[in-house]
Image (cartoon, rainbow, N blue to C red):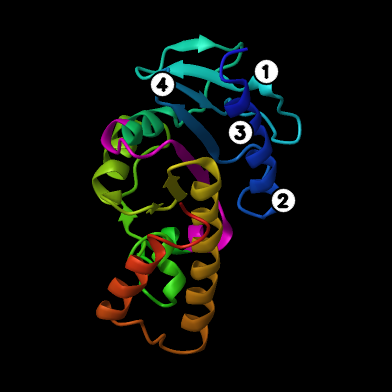
Amino acid sequence: MLMLRQRQEIVEYGLRMVRSGLTTGSGGNLSVLDPAQNLIAVSPSGIDYHEMTAADVVVVDRSGLTIDGHLKPSSELNFHLALYEARPEITAIVHTHSVYATTMACLQWEIPAVHYLVAFCGNKVPLAPYATFGSKELASGIVSSIGSYNAVLLANHGLVSVGVDMPSSFNVAEEIELVARIYYQAKSIGRPVLVDELEMERVVKKFSSYGQQG
């Protein structure tokens, strides 16, 4: 089976998405790029994560042509392909419908530096304009809005996070959901005081070497 490890990873992290409350049912999607083979493993369309197996995960090439698999790839394949093309350092993408991040997306608000943990994305979480799911317009809006950030809100839709591997991409999605919840709760009580720009520059720089790297 082509890309067995990556396919198993998508099954594992699909279940983690559900168990972490980042999506429900078959919502959202994930993919992993193998740069050496120029192949992408992507979750299938409309399959419940509790029922998904590695054999259900679809392998496509950079153009989106199915190379291995018996199911249709995610309906959001267009933006996965576009992000891998635009950001060569990315090898994993997670798309969630997490409640608090999606609430911000439905308000069409960016998430500002209300907490330093927003640095998992950058100095804020930007917002991509609304477009129909699965469309090339959505893919284009995501690429132009995410820039060099590690996540982007999709207006009236959800969140996309990216990373150098699946654990880092998933971690971004989890941390940004936490920050979105903090922002929601702070806004419910009063006016949040944001971390200033210079401090966020320091934090973003520190995050570049955060964890057990090297």
Name of the residue lying farthest toward the right: 51
Q: Which residues are magenta?
A: 85-103
Q: Give the secondary structure at mark 2.
A: helix
**SS for tag 3?**
helix
Q: Nearer the viewer, mark 2 or mark 3?
A: 3
* Rendered position, 48 above or below 60: below
Mark 1 / mark 3, whichever is N-terminal: 3
Q: Mark 2 and mark 3: span between their CA atoms?
A: 14 Å
Q: Upstream in the sequence, badge 3 or badge 4?
A: 3
What type is the residue that disc 3 sits on?
Ile
Amino acid under label 4? Answer: Ala
| Camera-nearest residue between 107 and 86 | 86
User: Is residue 96 rendered magenta in the image?
Assistant: yes
Spatial CA distance of label 1 from label 4 is: 21 Å
Question: Residue at point 51% right, 60% down?
Answer: 211
1 or 4: tag closer to the N-terminus: 4
Q: Which mark is residue 19?
A: 2
Could you say which disc has been placed on residue 10 in the image? 3
Residue 73 at x, y percent in the picture = 52, 22
Q: Quadrant of residue 111?
A: bottom left
Residue 105 location, x and y as percent? 42, 58
First along the sequence among labels 2 and 4: 2
- Is residue 154 visible from the viewing direction of this image? no
Q: Residue at x 35, y 17 (%)?
A: 63
Find disc 4 in the rendering and name its residue: 36
Question: Between marks 1 and 3, how big is the CA–CA gap?
Answer: 11 Å
Q: Residue tagged by mark 1? A: 55
> Which image quarter: residue 52?
top right
